Image (cartoon, rainbow, N blue to C red):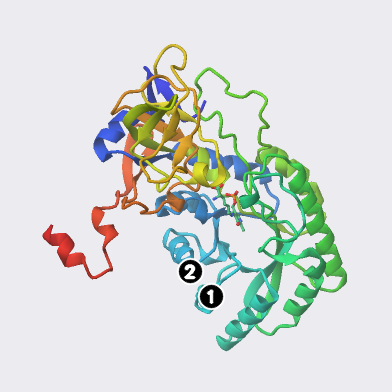
């Protein structure tokens, strides 16, 4: 049973009624289940058993330090992409030797900070970056541990904005120049070659793209070994898909034909035999899988209306709070916090208050009749929800709440309106008003 479920007709996160949290913190707010987070971690980690491995949580999915800490305490490393995320991961308790630093555009300052902290590995994505890392580490009289991100030319069959391992993508180094890159890295004074990396995309439902990527990595590891370049690890990246359509059990299956995600158990069964042959430590970088279904965005209905034969439910959350539907046409299951009996009363567009037609959470979605002030929960919002939020349209960011059992705790205050002018020199005027 999911952690978001109805009890006595009201939606709970674990044993905490969402209405109670709404009264305490106001809407909109993000709510996360600690129990689900830990269950997801166990589902990812346990099947790997005694195989040498490291799971590095992709911090970008949800960068709240309380979330990072819960995972770090259970042995997670962190996959980071900026100097800010480096600070955050260290502060939240991820040891440097479990941190991977990826990204196509690390600045010199970021490279320096990562080398100084002694991260497990920098995932290098270009020839120029290899030289820069070597130069910076040498000047610090250190050696930087690096892996090289290679594009295996695998089609992950996901949304084009989140497919990353294609030939013409901006990420990594093309497959046909991989050996050349490793040779260069092995010759550079400031570098220790530690591993090979690939990340082919996100929200991948099938096993086959991962199997293809694993086969590619295994072949490369063998070829490098024959050239006396020995790798300590192979990193298959993240990208594990989840089922966004049925997070809360409502009795009705909206789309029984939809493809379902493989899940880590089956994924490992497919890729481990391919890669353990190569005799190296296996790394994974899941983000979404660990946090997405552990979180929901709860909003109130501001107004309902009809326009040109269409009906609209307007929420007090907008695309600045959760941009995934606008950006990727992503599906999020949306359910009323107070359960209504009977069939859905209509198929409204569920939208936000922002001045953009692209500000929507769902189009034409079956929903019980709702009234002003009623609460709706947008599920599957634990990943790339808060972390992609903004102040667009003068909207302070929402609060974040962590639930454990029947207790809940504010893990980030909702922003005050002064974020809109802080740092501009208008602070004093803001206070006067
Ligand atoms: N490793 C690397 C190098 C990545 O670039 C990413 C995600 C991950 C790991 C984690 O991927 P995950 O397991 O979460 O799929 N904003 C989009 C997703 C962007 C993913 C970017 N990179 C969304 O909301 O669907």
Q: Is residue 402 visible?
A: no
Q: Look at mark 2 in the image and give the residue it sits on.
A: 83
Q: From the viewer's perspective, is 397 left or right of 207?
A: left
Judge by depth and name the residue closer to the eye, 126 or 78.
126
* Marks 2 & 1, CB-CB < 8 Å contact: yes
Q: Position of residue 316 (x, y in %)?
A: 33, 38
Q: From the viewer's perspective, is 155 left or right of 106?
A: right
Q: Look at mark 1 in the image and give the residue it sits on.
A: 107
Helix, strand or loop at disc 2? helix
Q: Position of residue 421 (x, y in %)?
A: 26, 62
Residue at 25% from the left image edge and 34% from the top image edge: 23
The mark nearer the N terminus, 2 or 1, is 2
Q: Position of residue 191 (x, y in %)?
A: 67, 79
Residue at 65% from the left image edge and 55% from the top image edge: 237
User: Can you name the residue that lies furthest to the right here?
Assistant: 226
Judge by depth and name the residue closer to the eye, 338 or 231.
338
Quadrant housing the C terminus? bottom left
């Amino acid at each position: 049973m999911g952690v978001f479920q109805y009890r006595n007709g009201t939606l709970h996160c674990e044993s905490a009624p969402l209405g109670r949290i709404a009264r305490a913190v106001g809407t909109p707010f993000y709510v996360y289940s600690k129990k689900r987070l830990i269950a997801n971690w166990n589902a990812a980690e346990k099947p790997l058993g005694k195989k040498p491995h490291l799971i590095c949580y992709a911090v970008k999915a949800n960068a709240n330090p309380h979330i990072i800490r819960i995972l770090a305490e259970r042995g997670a490393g962190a996959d980071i992409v900026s100097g800010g995320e480096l600070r955050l991961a260290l502060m939240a308790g991820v040891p440097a030797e479990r941190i991977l630093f990826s990204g196509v555009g690390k600045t010199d300052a970021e490279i320096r900070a990562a080398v100084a902290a002694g991260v497990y590995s920098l995932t290098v994505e270009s020839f120029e970056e290899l030289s820069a890392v070597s130069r910076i580490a040498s000047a610090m009289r250190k050696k930087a541990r690096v892996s090289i991100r290679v594009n295996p030319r695998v089609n992950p069959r996901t949304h084009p904005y989140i497919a990353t391992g294609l030939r013409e993508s901006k990420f990594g180094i093309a497959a046909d120049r991989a050996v050349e890159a490793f040779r260069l890295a092995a010759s550079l004074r400031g570098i220790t070659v530690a591993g090979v990396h690939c990340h082919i995309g996100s929200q991948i439902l099938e096993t086959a793209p991962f199997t293809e990527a694993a086969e590619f990595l295994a072949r490369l590891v063998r070829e490098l070994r024959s050239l006396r370049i020995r790798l300590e690890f192979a990193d298959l990246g993240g990208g594990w898909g989840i089922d966004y359509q049925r997070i809360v059990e409502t009795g009705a299956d909206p789309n029984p034909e939809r493809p379902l995600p493989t899940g880590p158990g089956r994924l490992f069964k497919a890729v481990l035999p391919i890669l353990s042959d190569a005799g190296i430590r296996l790394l994974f970088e899941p983000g979404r899988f660990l946090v997405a279904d552990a979180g929901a965005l709860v909003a109130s209905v501001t107004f309902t209306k009809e326009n040109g034969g269409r009906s609209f439910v307007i929420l007090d959350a907008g695309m600045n709070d959760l941009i995934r539907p606008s950006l990727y046409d992503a599906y999020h299951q949306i359910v009323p916090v107070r359960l209504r009996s009977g069939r859905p009363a209509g198929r409204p567009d569920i939208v936000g208050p922002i001045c953009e037609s692209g500000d929507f959470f769902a189009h034409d979605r079956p929903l019980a009749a709702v009234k002003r002030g009623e609460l709706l929960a947008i599920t599957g919002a634990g990943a790339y929800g808060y972390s992609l939020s903004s102040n667009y349209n003068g909207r302070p960011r929402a609060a974040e709440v962590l639930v454990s059992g029947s207790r809940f705790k504010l893990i980030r205050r909702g922003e005050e309106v002064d974020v809109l002018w802080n740092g501009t020199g208008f602070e004093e005027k803001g206070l006067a008003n």
